[in-house]
Amino acid sequence: MHSKQVWRLIPLLEAAGNLQMAIDRWLLEQHQLGKQPPTLRFYTWSPPAISLGYHQRQYPEYWQNIIWQGQKLDVVRRPSGGRAVLHQGDLTYAVVTSGLNGNRFQVYEKICEFLIEGWRSLGVKLSYGTTGRGYIHNPNCFGTSTGADLVLSNGAKFIGSAQMRRSGTILQHGSIRLQPDTELFARVFGAESFPNLQLAQNLSVEEIITALVIAASNCFAMQIEMQPLSQSEWDEILAQPILEC
């Protein structure tokens, strides 16, 4: 009988966006070099931030000066593609792995399986989005749903994911919208209709992470080992250059 592959689980971390992106980039590089196992982690952004896709060059200048609840919003660049995402009231997941075959969307679906299964166990049914017209021209990642996104039964986009691939190594991370602020969303992206999330469940972040970790263990047929970042790992992460906006 084959022993299950061991994945690393990094505990929930709240930190600034540039640091979170540096961690994801470092994990991808280390896994590619064979120095880190496949990794799963969850994190939140403090202060709230707008993350730009790696190739997204144009964005409104006023984004640099938005104050919300006394804090200035960060504007940071992701190593992954896609468009702008507002990180406030959300939970972000990141998966770093390798050995997945198929095109970009097939890989998305293989990784997203744990999100669908985990939320199903919490009583929330998710399905894949469909690309609407205006996808390319919409700077707001949550304004349209593509096949890489997961939507609720009412069509509202719930999880938006982005990917970075290096050889056979993949970083996929995504924003799970738990309690987004309608007013802030409108300030960032204009007076678009704000999708109604209708998440009636009063779930804690801990309950959500637990369900998603169990689902990941099943979907990836792996064994999870919780391991916080060590001081030497932090030193390496902090030594990396920041991706400029």
Image: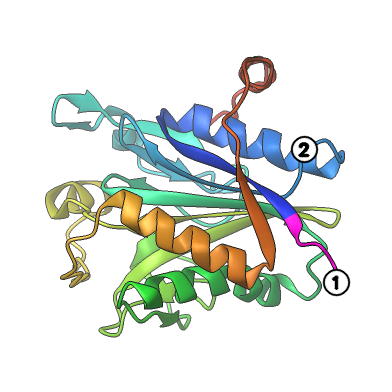
- The structure residue drawn at horizontal position 42% and vertical position 63%, both measured from the top left corner, is 211
Q: Which residue is mark 1?
A: 1
Disc 1 marks a residue whose amino acid type is Met
Q: From this viewpoint, is residue 132 visible? A: no
Closer to the N terminus: mark 1 or mark 2?
1
Image height of 55 relative to 141, above or below: above
Other residues around mark 2 within 10 Å, as few (<14) / some (14–19) / many (≥20):
some
Where's residue 59, x and y in %? 42, 44
Residue 29, label in figure: 2
Residue 99 to residue 231: above or below: below
Do we see residue 98 in this rendering? Answer: yes
Q: Secondary structure at mark 2?
A: helix
Identify the secondary structure beneath mark 1: loop
Amino acid type, label 2: Glu
Q: Position of residue 200 (x, y in %)?
A: 15, 70
Task: Give x and y (percent) for residue 9.
Answer: 58, 45
Quarter where residue 133 is shown: bottom left
Residue at horizontal 48%, vertical 68%? 115
- Asked whether residue 2 is drawn in magenta, I would say yes
**Mark 1 or mark 2, whichever is nearer to me:** 1
User: What residue do we see at 34% from left, 49% from top?
Assistant: 206
The range drawn in magenta is 1-5
Horizontal side, residue 127 vs residue 206: left or right? right
Separation of marks 1 and 2 at Cα, in angstroms? 31 Å
The N terminus: image quadrant: bottom right
- Residue furthest to the front in view is 1
Residue 86 horizontal/vertical position (percent): 34, 48
